[in-house]
Image (cartoon, grey):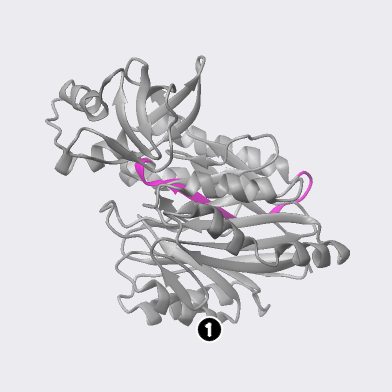
Amino acid sequence: MGTVTASGSSKLFDSDAAAREAVRAALAGLDGRQPSVGFLFASPAHDLGRALRAAREASRANVIGCSTAGEITERGLTHGGLALLLVASDTIAAHAGFSLGLRHNARNVADQLDHGLTEAGHLAAADGRPHLTSVVLTDGLAGTGERLVDDLHGRAKTGAQIVGGAAGDEGKFLRTVVGADAQSARDAAAALHVFDATRWGVGVDHGLRPTSERMRVTRATGNVVHELDGRPAFSAYQEHAATRGVDLTPQRASPYLIGNELGVHFFDKIERVRAPLSAGSDGSLSCAAEIPVGSMVSILDGEPDSMIHAARAAATEAKQSLGERRAAGVLLFDCVCRGMILKGKFQREIEAVRSTFGDVPVAGFLTYGEIARYRGRSDGWHNATAVVVAIPA
């Protein structure tokens, strides 16, 4: 029978009622089949723990989820709502994990998320499900998501993929929450390890361009960049903003930082994008992931057409990696900065993804970091990027 997916959404204020409404809508699209796994993305206005428990009880599926900076389904982008994707399949087996303490001990979190995974993998392979895709959701403010992804990838079997995103809180950068089944917390990560008979498709692109001269990171500690070219890092943003008529102060800098992220260069290519989340009183920048000392960086910007083209390119890559298989549904992990730049045009990005796959369910969220580590990519943590995950039918 293969795999089918269906999305559901709700704008109800009560978290339990919103989750149940989204589940009912998704179940109606599964034609009576029982879902085995689910992905729930909820506005920070919701109680994520309550929503997850209600979704699990109503669907009887293993569900992971997180708070968002915006919720996505094929019907559009919402703020203050809840989005859900349920997956029913006779070709997949799933193994869930949840752990606290991401900010200070990413390695221990990786240990907990991987607990029992080797044994589950052996059983799945023996049952004709050799392909592993781990959907990972992290606290968006921990600053150690990249370390976690690298650690998970380092211990994964050859060919395993890691996808997902970092939780958001509607651009407030104060509190993000992650959960699995009945558990939810800050400073946490959740994973749903999915073994399938067919490899899931993954694609990544950003469509951003430099809008400043290149600068060298001359002092950094962990995910905090202290100096660029020997000067306080934030001063580069103040000068950049001033050319646009913006008087930037540390207290209200976050939206501008997120809308103009840092590109890390490898010769002439932007190898990766990193999101500064806030500015310190000492002129430092706290980023969503580490930027090593010595890196060459520039401030980036995007315009809607190039970002929509990038989303279509990511979808095309994901589709091509499915081979001859068609997609049953799509997960979309999209940076909050892309939502800020596209604004009312965000539906164009969703349609660009759907035009690649046809009339399939889509669910996802605006993130504080995107995860995609798969065959052919040496980096797994992204910012200002669209990550498209195609679930094979």
Image quadrant in which you'd find residue 220:
top left
> In this figure, which residue is indicated by the disc labeled 1?
58
In the picture, measured across the screen, residue 220 lies left or right of residue 145, that is left
Whole-percent x and y of residue 193?
65, 61
Vertical side of 38 occupied by 348: above or below:
above
Instruction: Give me the residue at 46% from left, 82% from top.
Output: 54
Question: What residue is drawn where x is 84% and y is 61%?
Answer: 125
Vertical arrangement, residue 186 with respect to residue 382, above or below: below
Q: Is residue 363 visible?
A: no
Q: Main secondary structure of the magenta part?
A: strand
Nearer to the camera, 38 or 377: 377
- What amino acid is at disc 1? Ala
* Residue at 51% from the left image edge and 39% from the top image edge: 311
Q: Secondary structure at mark 1?
A: helix
Estimate the x, y position of residue 187 in percent, counting from the top left: 40, 61
Q: Is residue 75 magenta?
A: no
The N terminus sits in image quarter: bottom right
The answer to whether 102 is drawn above or below residue 4 in the figure is above
Q: Nearer the viewer, residue 93 or 358?
A: 93
Magenta-tinted stretch:
323-337
Name the quadrant of the C terminus. Answer: bottom right
Where's residue 355, x and y in %? 57, 45
Count the labels in the image.
1
* Nearer to us in this view, 302 or 369: 369
- Left/right of residue 159 with respect to residue 54 in the rendered view: right
Q: Is residue 384 visible?
A: yes
Mark 1: few/some/many CA within 10 Å (<14, 14-19, 20+): some
Horizontal and vertical percent position of residue 103? 42, 54
Residue reaching furthest to the bottom: 57
